[in-house]
């Protein structure tokens, strides 16, 4: 289990930032010398956001690209310790999906899927993406980031499971804390890294609605698409909040 405290997270991030100043950064997309992303790799990420294929139990979901190629490579680099340098870039891409959804507005609540650390940890990877997304989308005029979701018990691993197994594995694992009175009534937009079968987005939506919060949609960095005629499975798509 991850016992990282906010203070330890801040120290880690400061040390990482210092290393970035001292050591040359490689490009997360092609390992070239112009990090965190070279111009060519950044251009490859500049796709038009798309609305994802419907998944049962999920609200409308928008993604910045597929969980494949450069999108997958850069997202994995973010997961593996490049959060400081890549959060602004990926947050900008997430903002493009958020704006394309038409849901951005001062009353919108961006609700990140929780990480494995303490509740409301601002250094949780999806929370950092949500904060970077909001900054690029216009700040308070585009909404508020509220980490309202909590894990009920230890997060269970999803990687390698099919849709039915993932839905059963996620059912009842999240609980939502109602927002403060001044934020009550705002519509929620769930934020996550990857949409695979939709089990996590569906569970987040269920938990929020159970707390009386209206869910208008969701935004993700990448959508994992199944090959024609195959069910979606999650090999290689371990989430930030799953145990190793």
Image (cartoon, grey):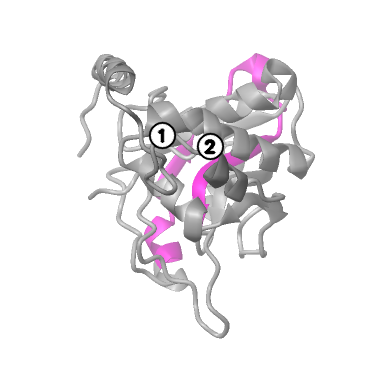
Residue pictured at 50% horizontal, 38% vertical: 38
State the residue position of label 1. Answer: 125
Tell me the number on the disc at residue 90: 2
Disc 1 element: helix
Snapshot quadrant of residue 16: top left
Q: Is residue 87 left or right of residue 1?
A: right
Vertical comparison of 96 with 53: above or below: above
Within 10 Å of disc 1 (Cα), the crowding (few <14, some 14-19, many 20+) is: many
Snapshot quadrant of residue 66: bottom right
Nearest the viewer among 179 and 34 is 34
Nearest the viewer among 141 and 87 is 87
Q: Is residue 131 left or right of residue 216?
A: left
Residue pictured at 39% horizontal, 32% vertical: 83
Q: Residue furthest bottom?
A: 229
In magenta, the rendered stretch is 166-195
- At which x and y percent is residue 131? 54, 25
- At which x and y percent is residue 57? 61, 59
Residue pictured at 68% horizontal, 43% vertical: 97
Within 10 Å of disc 2 (Cα), the crowding (few <14, some 14-19, many 20+) is: many
Snapshot quadrant of residue 182: top right
Q: Is residue 94 left or right of residue 237?
A: right
Residue pictured at 30% horizontal, 31% vertical: 117
Q: Specify which label sits upstream in the sequence, 2 or 1.
A: 2
- At which x and y percent is residue 68? 49, 61
Is 185 covered by the magenta stretch? Answer: yes
Q: Nearer the viewer, mark 2 or mark 1?
A: 2
Vertical comparison of 98 with 15: above or below: below
Nearest the viewer among 122 and 118 is 122
Q: How far separated are the C-alphas under marks 2 and 1?
A: 11 Å
- At which x and y percent is residue 99? 74, 37
């Amino acid at each position: 289990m991850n016992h990282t405290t906010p203070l330890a997270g801040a120290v880690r991030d400061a040390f990482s930032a210092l290393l970035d100043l001292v050591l040359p950064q490689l490009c997360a997309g092609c390992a070239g010398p112009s990090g965190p992303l070279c111009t060519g790799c950044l251009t490859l990420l500049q796709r038009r956001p798309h609305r994802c294929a419907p998944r049962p139990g999920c609200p409308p979901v928008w993604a910045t690209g597929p969980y494949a190629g450069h999108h997958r490579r850069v997202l994995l680099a973010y997961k593996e310790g490049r959060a400081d340098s890549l959060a602004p870039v990926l947050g900008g891409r997430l903002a493009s999906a958020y704006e394309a959804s038409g849901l951005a507005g001062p009353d919108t609540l961006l609700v990140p899927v929780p990480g494995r650390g303490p509740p409301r940890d601002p250094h949780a990877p999806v929370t950092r993406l949500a904060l970077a997304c909001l900054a690029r989308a216009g700040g308070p005029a585009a909404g508020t980031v509220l980490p309202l979701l909590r894990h009920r018990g230890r997060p269970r691993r999803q990687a390698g499971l099919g849709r039915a197994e993932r839905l059963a594995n996620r059912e009842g694992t999240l609980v939502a804390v109602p927002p403060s009175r001044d934020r009550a009534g705002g519509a929620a937009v769930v934020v996550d890294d990857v949409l695979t079968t939709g089990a996590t987005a569906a569970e987040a939506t269920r938990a929020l609605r159970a707390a009386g919060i209206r869910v208008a949609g969701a935004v993700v960095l990448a959508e994992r698409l199944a090959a024609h005629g195959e069910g979606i499975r999650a090999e290689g798509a371990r989430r930030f909040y799953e145990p190793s």
